[in-house]
Image (tube, grey):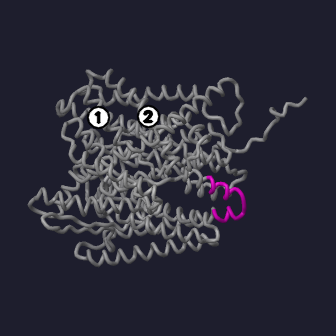
Amino acid sequence: MTDHRTAPVHPIAELTVRGVLLGGIITLLFTAANVYLGLKVGLTFATSIPAAVISMAILRMLPGATILENNIVQTVASAAGTLAAIIFVLPGLVMIGWWHGFPYVQTAAITMTGGILGVMFSVPLRRALVVDSDLPYPEGVAAAEVLQIGAGSRAGEAEAKQGLLVLVWNSIASAGFAIFTQTKIVTDTAATTFRVGAGATGISGSLSFALLGVGHLVGISVGAAMALGVVIGWFILVPVMTAAHPMPGDIAAWVTTIWKNDVRFFGAGLIGVSAIWTLLKIAGPVIGGVRSALVASAARGQGETLALEERDIPIAWVAGGSLLTLLPIAWLLWDVIAGGALAASALLLIAGALVFILVAGLMIAAVCGYMAGLIGASNSPVSGIGILSVLGSALMLVGLFGQNPGADTTTALIAYSLIVTGIVFGVATISNDNLQDLKTGQLVGATPWKQQVALLIGVVFGSLIIPPVLNVLNSGIGFVGVPGAGPNALAAPQAGLISALAKGVLSGNANWPMLEYGALAGVVLIALDELLGRLKLLRLPPLGVALGIYLPMSVILPTVLGSVIGWFYNRWARTAANPEVAERMGTLTATGLIVGESLWGVAFAVVVYATNSDAPLALIGKGYETASLVGGTTLFLLIAAWLYRSSMQRAVR
């Protein structure tokens, strides 16, 4: 008698060398772009869909390409969009003066160990949050649709080619405009401040195609919330706070000081409350999901045979890999402590930090995985997770050392807190992404353990490229708040906030009143958002409002404009002959706008560093600001209209 259960099955190419190498190359490019974008505006973009499009276009030219191989490419490359978010923490070490650059081994190790733990911690959650869940996973489903269309027909081949052209041409246009602004013939930023009664405020905006693309991707709901944040921050809080704290001298300096020292902390309090609310909302489902995963694991351990598409990395390997990863983490922590003010407490500090990383990491993996499934990896409030993590680690250190234990000790404690937060943040970003990838894999019939291995490879690739990119940007452009930073300095908003929070908690100088007011406002905004949801009206996510308060207005206004343009484009796409293809072309348009300008930003940092000039491409000097603003705005709008029109035409071919 033939045992059909053991009948040979011809394997389909999946985890291939060429797929891993292609995914690695895409990862390197997109990681560099995301590092620059995150440091400039505090936002990163999801890379799965553009990586899938590029993969299909390239692998089609090679023999034997399969949908599963394309899926591995986008799985490896997806690490670019998430692991790059480590820059929300690490520049803080330069801002406080602990690092003067980004040491390669330490930077790569912080990034890599957090990412590896993020993959490991989320493996047991796959069955609960992906297989046995009705979470929508918007980006995972979209990526699966792209792969299925590309693999299914000649029409899919045509779409892949058109999509790649859209991505390339928009990248070229975005980079070209950014280069043109560096000649100073057209400007990329305009700002003015003015008095409002006894106080003052300002208006600023930038001509940035990258921000326009970000707005398209985050959508009209987040865009509207950001616009509300601008109103609250700049047209309510700044005028009121400046009136209450008059300062002599320049109005711009007065407004900027109030915004940086008070209003931004209001936004930070709002971010923290938004993150806590998310945790409370999903606590029940997450606990149930973990319980389900453990039951399934026990059943498999009793000999149950699973299909290929249900096989994860074995749980024993997950546990062993997680424990082994703690060894380099312990070395990283010792590297901070050795020979310094904290050396006498090394054992206690390292043990406490490892326990904190394990406990907080496991919770965060579940939380971020659920959030990614609910609202998408791009929209998940991982910044809020970082803020809660740094507060938790800093308070733990206060419990051991008290507040303000001396200048040297305090600086060492701040650095220690930031490194612990960086590792936990790596867990958050990767777990926020990989369940989205595993959803894509489930829909296309992939093998989970192969995808999980691909994610680990993506973590390694991304970790290797992040340190040199950070060093180029630090040397060539610098970060706001760091001595010697030039006029092109990157804001690094989350890193500035997280380091300021750690410093405030440990030194006892945190702006607690504004944090508390922000937290109270967060409660009101949460109630408003829930009410809007019940009334089925446009929702205003509290995190979006907080970002509108916390980030510079020059960043928010073009992002809001991009969300409006994206809304109109998607309305048109729904009326097209093939709505899904039309909407994906819009997504690729926005992604191209982000990639082009962001990659040029990295290249420009190299030029600045090589020439030792803040404006190495300038062709005209001062005195033409009005003309360059009018000309730049006109050119920007014309190019944007042409690019979107071209994408619409390609979508209906």
Residue 184 higher or lower than 379, as above or below: below
Q: Which residue is mark 1?
A: 394
Please tell me which residue lies in front, 382 or 612.
382
Counting other residues with Cα less than 10 Å from the Cα at mark 1, is it few (<14), some (14-19), or many (20 or more)? Answer: many
Location of residue 223 (image quadrant): bottom left
Residue 399 within the magenta-colored segment of the rendering: no
| Overall secondary structure of the magenta section | helix
Q: Which residue is mark 2?
A: 361
Report helix, strand or loop for mark 1.
helix
Q: Position of residue 593 (x, y in %)?
A: 46, 64
Location of residue 563 (image quadrant): bottom left
Q: Position of residue 322 (x, y in %)?
A: 49, 29
Where, quadrant-wise, is the C terminus in this rendering?
Answer: bottom right
For the record, the magenta segment spans 144-159
Where, quadrant-wise, is the N terminus in this rendering?
Answer: top right
- The answer to whether 485 appears left or right of 460 in the picture is left
